[in-house]
Image: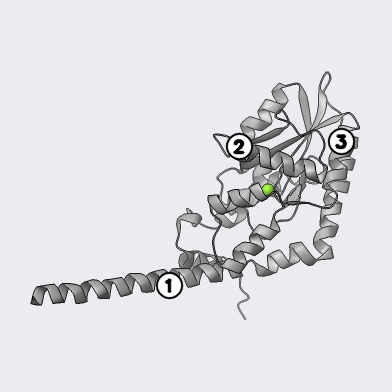
Amino acid sequence: MKSTALRVVVLSGMATVVAGCVTDQNAAQVKLEQQAVLAVNWVQQSGEYQALAYQAFNTARRAFDTAKAQAGRKKAVIVDLDETMIDNSAYAAWRIEHGVPYTKPTWARWMEAKQAVAIDGAVSFARYVNSHGGRMFYVSNRDDTSYVATVENLQKLGFPGVSRETVLLRTTQSNKQARFDLVKSKGYDVVVYIGDNLNDFGTEYYGKNNRERRLQVAAQQKQFGSKFIMLPNPAYGDWISGMAVDYYKQTPARQLEINRENLRVWKD
Ligand SMILES: [Mg+2]
């Protein structure tokens, strides 16, 4: 009797500790999501974000016009989709509202809803390329199981030349280099790459930490604005996981600490 009673007390105590832990982690997760509020406000509300988007596609158009394709090859432009051509910030806002992290099932549900909107300047740029001797390739790390929904979303927004040949989603690997090479192997000279993540520009950035990524950016500095065109994405990206090894394997509480530890602070 005694031992059973004790076990009940111990077990219920453990349950309280576990429940307490879960509550703490939930609170940390909510706080983590809250850190994205201003980033999402900026993307959705600021004229500054809109101006940068136009600036990116105006620059891309000049770069495309200026570029000469290698002899016997046709000019191609490779673009990323999410936060490059289409805006999924409503999904980010939904996560903030619910205090929940990115998960594959909720992201899949968002994609199936086909509610992404076009980023300013993206559709007219894509149409310009396809009507001026080039070809658009949409290389995205959306899972290939979302192909139909993604294509329908893109077509609804007016993106041109959307097909199995030009929309290359993720099947086995998230490193995009193999898909870039596939486009080149079909006789194209890829003259411009557009993305919101350095990984959209080549394998040099894949799996690297922020220090390495910044060194690579410095090494390629002359190509930004000509071969590589960057859209701003303050809400998410590999720049976040680039702050610490296995960032996304950490608890929300630890992720909050890492974010704070990565601030360069005025030592007054
Ligand atoms: Mg993207």
- The CA span between labels 3 and 2 is 25 Å
Q: Tell me the quarter of the picture where residue 219 sits.
A: top right
Taking depth in this image into account, of 222 and 55 the one nearest to the observer is 55
Taking depth in this image into account, of 147 and 205 the one nearest to the observer is 147
Q: Which residue is mark 1?
A: 23
Mark before the other along the chain sequence, 1 or 3: 1
- The CA span between labels 1 and 3 is 51 Å
Mark before the other along the chain sequence, 2 or 1: 1
| Residue depicted at 15% across the width and 76% down the height | 6
- The amino acid sitting under disc 3 is Val
Apparent side of residue 11 relative to residue 162 in the rendered image (left or right) = left
- The CA span between labels 2 and 1 is 35 Å
Apparent side of residue 237 relative to residue 58 in the rendered image (left or right) = left
Q: Which residue is mark 2?
A: 144
Instruction: Examine the rendered structure and indicate whether residue 263 appears above or below residue 249.
Output: below
Query: How many labels were placed on the picture?
Result: 3
Quick one: SS at disc 3? Answer: helix
Quadrant where the image shows the N terminus: bottom left
- The amino acid sitting under disc 2 is Asp
Query: Disc number at residue 129?
Result: 3
- The amino acid sitting under disc 1 is Thr
Image location (x, y in percent) of residue 266: 63, 76
Q: Are marks 3 and 2 in contact (CB under 8 Å)?
A: no
| Residue depicted at 61% across the width and 66% down the height | 96
